[in-house]
Image (spheres, rainbow, N blue to C red):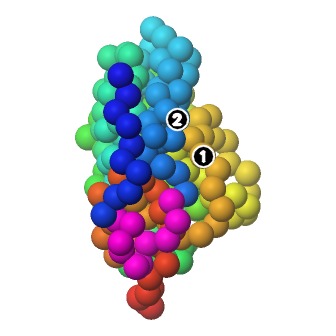
Amino acid sequence: MELPSPATSHWDDDPDLGSVVVDEQGIRRRVRELADEVTEDYGDRPPLLVGVLKGAFVFMSDLARAVRLPVEVDMMAVASYGSAATTSGVVRILKDLDTDLTDRHVLVVEDIVDSGLTLSYLRRNLMARRPASLEVCALLVKDGRQRAPLDLRYVGFRIPGDFVVGYGLDIAERYRNVPDVRVYQGPVAVG
Ligand code: PRP
């Protein structure tokens, strides 16, 4: 049985947070749908889920538990933003995978695709490790922000270009624990 979403949350009182872009119930429902698709598509070849930290930790946790296959989970940490709300275009690997990807069915789990630079870099980097297959599951994709089309096998929601936080997404490391996705309307550090 589904628990009702609270009508209000204490995050509503935070002046730096604006409107809810995707609510908790919508996320729950969509994560279940994505997990069902993954379960059906991969069948007898359970994928290695590769989470992209830090943002993907919440989505990964919910998705992995909703997929009805004996998946494996690994994480890598990359950074493209620094603390400002604009993309720098620079992608650095802060923590690499523990798993050898050779001949593995790899499903990259991302919280958000904005410019697409992180994903393009990751795809090239991971393909060089010769997996049997490589697909991407992104919860959020910002509309019209990618310079080149990205091959995204699973997409949760297409959202407008506003800066959003919550459900793993941060501004200067804050708000990752907000249970829904909200517009951030507070001050943005420069640099
Ligand atoms: C975010 C997000 C993606 C990336 C998307 O990560 O998790 O990895 O930005 O942006 P892009 O499509 O413009 O490349 P971020 O670098 O903010 O790090 P974090 O996950 O640790 O918050």
Tell me where the magenta segment starts and ends, as one range. 11-20
Observer able to see residue 121: no
For residue 169, what is the image quadrant? bottom left
The numbered disc on residue 119 is: none
Left/right of residue 23 with respect to residue 63 in the rendered view: right
Q: Identify which residue, 93 or 4, lies in the foreground.
A: 4
Which amino acid lies under the numbered mark 1 shown in the image of this protein?
Answer: Phe
Label 2 sits on residue: 30
Label 2–label 1 contact, CB within 8 A: yes
Which amino acid lies under the numbered mark 2 shown in the image of this protein?
Answer: Arg
Q: Residue at x 32, y 27 (%)?
A: 65
For residue 77, what is the image quadrant? bottom left
**Is label 2 within 8 A of ligand 1 (CB to nearest ligand atom)?**
no
Q: Identify which residue, 117 or 165, lies in the foreground.
A: 165
Q: Identify which residue, 24 or 38, lies in the foreground.
A: 24
As for residue 13 lying within the magenta part, the answer is yes
Cα distance in 3D space between marks 2 and 1 = 8 Å
- Establish if 98 lies above or below 33: below
Whichever of callouts 2 and 1 sits on the residue coming sooner in the sequence is 2
The N terminus lies in which quarter of the figure?
Answer: top left
For residue 187, what is the image quadrant? bottom left
Label 1 sits on residue: 157
Task: Pinpoint residue 62: horizontal percent, then vertical percent.
Answer: 35, 36
Q: Residue at x 39, y 66 (%)?
A: 12
Task: Pinpoint residue 149: horizontal percent, then vertical percent.
Answer: 73, 51
Q: Secondary structure at mark 1?
A: strand
Observer able to see residue 133: yes
